Amino acid sequence: MKRRLTVVVAAAALAAWAGCTDLPSDPKTPFAVEFTAPASPSVVLGDMLRDSLGLVAPLRAVAFNVHGDTIRDAAIRFAVVPVANDSTPARIDPATGTLIARPERVFAGRTFRVYAQVGSIQTVPVVLTVTRRPDVLLAVSPEVQSMPLRFSDTAAYSPTFSVRLRHDDAAFPGDSAVPAYEVRYRIVSAASLDTAYIVLTHGSRAHAQVDTTDANGVASRERLRVDFRRFPRTTAATVGDSLVDSVRVEARAYRAGGPVPGSPRILTLLIKTLKLATP
């Protein structure tokens, strides 16, 4: 994705230079700019943009010359795409990329766009969301779930591990969802399964440890993919045998100052093979 953004901006720069006799030869002259993906898809009301560990994370971009070399001291500026009537949900320091969301509750759930610029070259805007402060992490799916497997299965997917981030405000009890917020998952223990053979995923073969909450504050895509071909059978299965294993998955979210209360939330998956039928 980052490389594609760079190529798009470079193409725009090339078009801008098309009417010139020569491309810029000065190694300090920007020819393309790459906008690094923001550390989070959202920023909390009245707070600065932070990464998944709760640390302040200014926006970042890199400028390149016509040879593709990095221009380390390029004068990159950052901006929020303005909204009419001064209702832009966030403010930004143009030089440092420090992004701060406005504190008014009315902006919760609003999206806005930011971009980077060097000289006359501007990146494609990136969309961010203003969200509420997460005050507690709760389990939505059962904290202990079961997953049946057959000896004929090659791989199978567990039920999803769902959690919810909630904002607690006694003055606005219905104003509780925390959308567009990252939740991190990791396997913390497996009784007999080698974790090389169980993978956290969103439903494909790809490894995925981060999910983003939906409009209701729920992160519900994470699941385990179990490669049953590598299930550690210590002996040949006989009639009536039933292999059982358990895997513990940790769900955690961070905010300014540390983990969100309720983190980590431990979710357990019991893996059970179906008993062999009597011949």
Image (cartoon, rainbow, N blue to C red):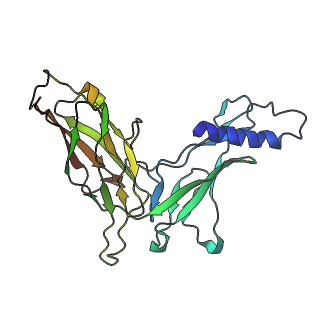
Q: In this rendering, is residue 274 above or below 132?
A: above
Residue farthest along the front direction in this orientation: 279
Foreground residue among 120 and 213: 213
Left or right, 62 with respect to 274, comes to right
Give the x, y percent position of residue 263: 26, 52
Give the x, y percent position of residue 247: 21, 39
Q: In this rendering, is residue 132 above or below 200?
A: below
Left or right, 202 with respect to 59, comes to left
Foreground residue among 177 and 226: 226
Q: Can residue 225 be seen from the camera position used here?
A: no
Q: Which residue is drawn at 46% across and 58% down?
A: 43
Foreground residue among 90 and 27: 90
Q: Which residue is drawn at 12% across and 28% down?
A: 279
Left or right, 114 with respect to 22, comes to left
Quarter holding residue 47 = bottom left
Quarter holding residue 207 = top left
Q: Can residue 149 be seen from the camera position used here?
A: yes
Q: Residue at x 34, y 61 (%)?
A: 134
Residue farthest along the top direction in this orientation: 235
- Report the label total: 0
Q: Residue at x 46, y 51 (%)?
A: 40
Foreground residue among 172 and 224: 224
Give the x, y percent position of residue 65: 72, 33
Quarter holding residue 1 = top right
